[in-house]
Amino acid sequence: MQKTLDLDLWLDQSLIQRQNQLKADFLYLFEQVGNHFSNQELADFFPNSKGKKISKGNQLEGFPYIVLDLIRDFDLITGCNIRLVSWFGHGLYCCVFLGQKKAYPSVPFLETGFQLGDVSKPWDLPAQLDWLESSFSIATPQKECVLWIKKISLPSFLELAEQRLKEEVIKILQVQRI
């Protein structure tokens, strides 16, 4: 069998333009959310905060993605990170990573719809989603690091989406260490 090129897709400028516009919209959305929170607010939640960063790529299992990281301390023992991930074709996710020595209560996360992820692969979103689909998320984290994950439904209006994401981050930043 001879393989063919999908030249119609290749030449569909409107499809490419729509995808590029959506990437730009998510980049703007994440910039607005990130800029809403001062470095001091992040340090109040986690003193060793290293600020904010947006990353993007095109090949997370073949799909584009944009990531907003807040706090950015990825140490498995003492770290903390709040991550928003827009994964094209899959959805928007909020992940909260807490190192082994960072104790925050579970109840506020559970009450706002978070589930526990697989701490053996804290930065592998596809593996986390597979984990959540195939396992029961227990309510009490063990003594190792903790990863909370939540899928977020976004309204299509940019201003409402921005407000929704800010509210999600505010809820996280209001959790007090125990």
Image: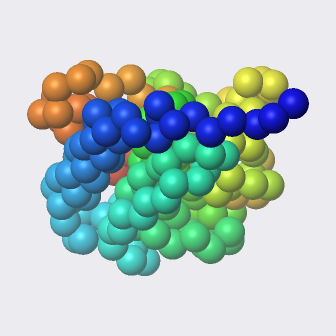
Q: Position of residue 67 (x, y in %)?
A: 43, 55
Residue 119 versus residue 1: which sits nearer the camera? 1
Residue 37 sits in quarter: bottom left
The image shows a total of numbered marks equal to 0
130 left or right of 98 in image = right
Residue 74 versus residue 88: which sits nearer the camera? 88
Looking at the image, which residue is at 62% across and 73% down? 75
Q: Residue furthest left?
A: 159
Q: Residue furthest right?
A: 1
Residue 159 sits in quarter: top left
Q: Position of residue 136 (x, y in %)?
A: 77, 24
Q: How is the image coloured?
A: rainbow
The relative height of residue 100 versus residue 172 in the rendered view (above or below) is below
Looking at the image, which residue is at 38% across and 23% down? 153
60 left or right of 34 in image = right
Residue 102 visible to an observer of this rendering? yes
Residue 166 visible to an observer of this rendering? no
Q: Position of residue 1 (x, y in %)?
A: 87, 30
Q: Residue furthest front?
A: 2
Looking at the image, which residue is at 38% across and 56% down? 68
28 left or right of 124 in image = left
Residue 80 versus residue 141: which sits nearer the camera? 80
The relative height of residue 164 versus residue 148 in the rendered view (above or below) is above
Looking at the image, which residue is at 33% across and 68% down? 52
Q: Position of residue 126 (x, y in %)?
A: 68, 42
